[in-house]
Image (cartoon, rainbow, N blue to C red):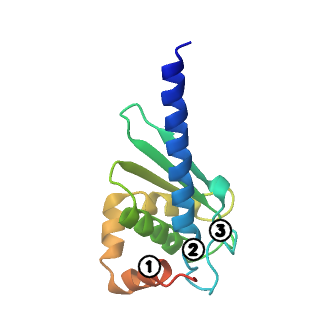
Amino acid sequence: MDTSVDAIDQDLDTELKLLQDTIYDLISKIKDPEKPESLEELNVISESGVKLSRLRSGQILAQIEFVPTVPHCNLASIIGLSIRSKLDKYLPEKLKVDIFIKEGTHDTATEINKQINDKERISAAMENPNLQKLVHDCVENEET
C-alpha cells in the first residue's frame, strides 16, 4: 500500500473532523425560538447529529440531524432555517448542507425536511420580515 496515499487519506479525515467540530460549534449555540436555552442545552443538536462526507465531485456534504423538543413542535422549521442561516453565513460555499429532523421525532418531519432543504422555499420564507427577525434572533442572540 502506498504510504503517501494513506497520508493524504489521513489528512482528509483530519480536515473533515475539524470541519465537523466547527459545524457543531456553530450550530450548538443557536438559541431555541421559544426558550432561553441553546439547541445544545435542549438536546435538539448533538455531535452525533453532524456527519460529513466527501462527494465524488470533491464537494463536502454536511448532513445535520436535529430532534425537536416535542413531536408537534410548531417551530421546528424555524430551527432548521436557523441552522441553515448560521451555516450559510460562516461556511465555505463548496459545502453542501442537508438538514433533517431525526426520523420518528416529529409529526410533520417529511414536510419540514422538504421546506428547509429547498432553495426556493427557503428564499420565500426568508423574505417574510417576521420570520427573518425570528431566525436572526435565534442565530445572533446566542447565549455566551
**In the drawing, does residue 114 fall left or right of residue 121?**
right
- The amino acid sitting under disc 3 is Val
User: Closer to the N terminus: mark 2 or mark 1?
Assistant: 2
The residue under label 1 is 135
**Pointer 2 local density, CA inside 10 Å: few below 14, some 14–19, many at least 20:** many
Task: Quote the CA–CA distance across marks 2 and 1.
Answer: 13 Å
Up/down of 6 relative to 103, above or below? above
Residue positioned most to the top: 1
Quarter-of-image position of residue 103:
bottom right
Q: Residue 125 location, x and y as percent?
A: 36, 73
The residue under label 2 is 29
| Residue 53 visible to the viewer | yes
User: Closer to the N terminus: mark 3 or mark 1?
Assistant: 3
Q: Quadrant of the N terminus?
A: top right
Q: Secondary structure at mark 1?
A: helix
The residue under label 3 is 44
Q: Residue 108 location, x and y as percent?
A: 58, 64
> Is the residue under label 2 in contact with that under label 3 (CB below 8 Å)?
no
The residue located at (52%, 27%) in the rendering is 7
Q: Residue 47 location, x and y as percent?
A: 65, 57
User: Closer to the N terminus: mark 3 or mark 2?
Assistant: 2
Quarter-of-image position of residue 133:
bottom left
The residue located at (68%, 69%) in the rendering is 71
- Between label 3 and label 2, give the one nearer the viewer: 2
- The amino acid sitting under disc 2 is Lys
Total labels drawn: 3
| Residue 52 visible to the viewer | no
Q: Residue 81 location, x and y as percent?
A: 45, 69
The residue located at (53%, 72%) in the rendering is 79
- The amino acid sitting under disc 1 is Val
Q: Secondary structure at mark 3?
A: loop
